[in-house]
Image: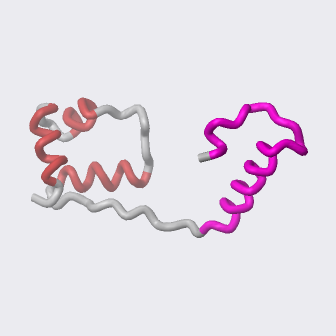
Amino acid sequence: MEAVDLPVAYEADDRANHIMQLILLELRSSVELPLCVPIPTHVRLASKCRRFLAKPNSRDTIDDWAVALHMSRRAFIRLFRRRRE
């Protein structure tokens, strides 16, 4: 939380530098955990989700997904929220 308010530019002997060095040290010693995302049981939505996880695209919108699955935006949102049906 301390790092949020630090200035972008700081001197090597500043408190800010020590905080940032500690963060970097902690990041290096952290363990990478696998992403755990429940995959829907709906066949087409599950397939689309797997393709997205294999190659994420942050520019895709809800409307893009709905069109790709040949459904309305509203139907897609309902389906995505259910995930297990």
Q: Nearer the viewer, residue 58 or 81?
A: 81
Relative side of 71 to 21, left or right: left
Q: Position of residue 9 (x, y in %)?
A: 79, 31
Q: Position of residue 72 (x, y in %)?
A: 12, 32
Q: Is 21 situated above or below 8?
A: below
Find the magenta span and give its range: 2-30
Taking the magenta stretch, the answer to whether it contains residue 27 is yes
Predominant SS of the magenta segment: helix
Q: Residue at x 66, y 60 (%)?
A: 27
Relative side of 57 to 82, left or right: right
The image's colour scheme reads secondary structure
Relative side of 59 to 38, left or right: right
Q: Position of residue 51 (x, y in %)?
A: 35, 51
Q: Position of residue 34 (x, y in %)?
A: 46, 66
Taking the magenta stretch, the answer to whether it contains residue 18 is yes
Q: Is 23 situated above or below 75?
A: below
Which quadrant of the figure has residue 7? top right
